[in-house]
Amino acid sequence: MGKGRKQLNDDFAKLLKKLRLAKGYSLQQLADRSNVTPSYLNRLERGERKTPTFSVLQHIAEGLDVDVNVLLGLDAKDTNEPLSLEELFFTNEIEFGGKQLTADQKEVLLDIIQEALETEATPVELLMDSLKKIGMLICELKES
């Protein structure tokens, strides 16, 4: 690990991908906006690279239009800016039933919330389909 670099955890990888997808950016689009190669962004998202320089983090944050502190998982409570669910989940430790949730569990919970919020209440067939998806995600959550 390079001098002055801190290794980022799995939450960073999940947060980066969720923020990129929430903006609707492909890896190439984020690369164009951040001046970071798509292959490096992909490795960061997969957790294969865990020690980006602060300069790279700044470029990525600018490309995503978020504060670099969000990517670093630093406390954003002092700002008046609302947090996205991704920021809330991946910049905080979350505990349930006395156990700390993993990055994978947080990701599945976000998927469940997204599915529930995007569900159209009518017609009934759409609701049933969404409930099936939520049920499968809950099973995935319990397995992770």
Image (tube, helix red, strand yellow):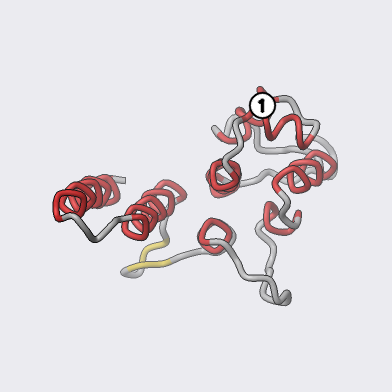
Left or right relative to 107: residue 22: right
x%, y% of residue 106?
A: 43, 54
x%, y% of residue 51?
A: 72, 38
Determine the residue located farthest toward the front in the rendered image.
123
x%, y% of residue 18?
A: 53, 46
User: In which image quadrant can residue 41 be found?
Assistant: top right
The three-letter code of the residue at mark 1 reads Gln
At horizontal 68% and vertical 69% (from top left) the residue drawn is 76
For label 1, the residue is 28
Query: Is 99 drawn above or below residue 132 in the view shown?
Result: below
x%, y% of residue 30?
A: 69, 35
Query: Is 56 drawn above or below residue 128 in the view shown?
Result: above
| Quarter of the image with the N terminus in it | top right
Figure disc tally: 1
Q: Secondary structure at mark 1?
A: helix
Determine the residue located farthest toward the top in the rendered image.
39
At horizontal 55% and vertical 47% (from top left) the residue drawn is 22
In this view, the residue in front, 49 or 115, is: 115
At horizontal 60% and vertical 66% (from top left) the residue drawn is 83
In this view, the residue in front, 33 or 91, is: 33
User: In which image quadrant can residue 122 be found?
Assistant: bottom left
Within 10 Å of disc 1 (Cα), the crowding (few <14, some 14-19, many 20+) is some
Query: Is 56 drawn above or below residue 110 in the view shown?
Result: above
Left or right relative to 41: residue 10: left
In this view, the residue in front, 29 or 37, is: 29
